[in-house]
Amino acid sequence: MSRFYDLASVTKPLVTAPLALAFLDLDADRRWSLGFHDRELPLTARQLLSHSSGLPPWRPYTGESVAKQLRRPVPDHPLLRPATPGLATYSDLNFRLLGELLEQGTGVHFAQLGEGSGLSAAPWLAAPTNMPDGPDAEAWGLATDMALPARDPHLPHDANARAGMRGHAGFGTTPEQFHLALARWVAAGWPERMAVETAPGEGGTIWGLGLQVAFSGSGRFGQLLSRLSQGFGVHVIEAPGNEAPLPAPPLDDDAGPRSDWWFHLGYTGPAVFYRPSDGSCLGLLAHRRGPAGELLDAEALRGRRWLALSRFVGQSGG
């Protein structure tokens, strides 16, 4: 049987962003419909897609509205911190709100809307590789008195997503299914519409409408993928899941020039890369559990991704 992967935040560009582009007026002010009655600036789908709304990175999904949660003070934590003024701040909340807008506008549950992507909405029949909880489980207890949602092997891994998956997570795939979904995604023109420079972000990032620019500095994925020839089409690769990841090249402080590639990463390990100049697309399927069952940190996960991508680039003549 083919391995099954939790796509986590890769759901954002493959499911939520295409639905938003298809069904939502990107520039309509949504403050009132989303409960942000005391917000001074407009709140639009374009801002949500580009993470330029000014919302913080995360809040637990408890059933309360995002607007109500943000009125409640929280302690210091990287996931609970305020957004950086004037810069796009990557936030699950942006895509949670897009999921709500889509349900409001269509009257259809988000998971049902997402079935058109060709990916599988949770709960899944085939369970992906199980992993330990991450930083969101710690942040959950700091931001609410509600109990952490119970684990279920057939629901997404991160604590926030397994409680409420609208917009930002909740879809999974086999490698074969992923290839078909990516081919349809590219053929429909969705990533081309998303790979449009919209907002400067934290740490020198540049966001489009659901994808971000890959840079070409040392240790960046754009540097590695720039070796791929034009017109290689759509490919899916799987990262080795049972071996200890090798270190990726060190990251320079300078991200270097922008590459021709745009991308998105998932918390659980997967990623998607897209090159507008020729429509080439690379899907990476991985998980972030280490060989001893531990949760890989971000640097070890980067090493796992780098190894899989470098092997593919080498095999492709790059």
Image (cartoon, helix red, strand yellow):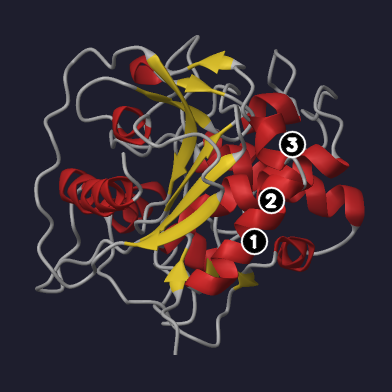
Q: Quick one: SS at disc 1?
A: helix
Give the residue at mark 3. 35
Compared to residue 250, the image places residue 102 above or below, namely below
Label 2: few (<14), some or many (≥20) within 10 Å? Answer: many
Give the residue at mark 2. 185
Q: Quick one: SS at disc 2?
A: helix
Label 1: few (<14), some or many (≥20) within 10 Å? Answer: some
Left or right placement of residue 38 versus residue 205 in this view: right
**Gap in angstroms between the C-alphas marked 2 and 3:** 32 Å
Give the residue at mark 1. 181
Residue 310 visible in this rendered orientation of the protein: yes
Percent coordinates x, y for residue 167 in the rendering: 64, 51
Percent coordinates x, y for residue 127 in the rendering: 44, 83
On the image, which quarter does residue 132 sit in? bottom left
**Gap in angstroms between the C-alphas marked 1 and 3:** 34 Å
Task: Check if mark 2's residue and mark 1's residue have beta carbons within 8 Å.
Answer: yes
Left or right placement of residue 61 versus residue 130 in this view: right
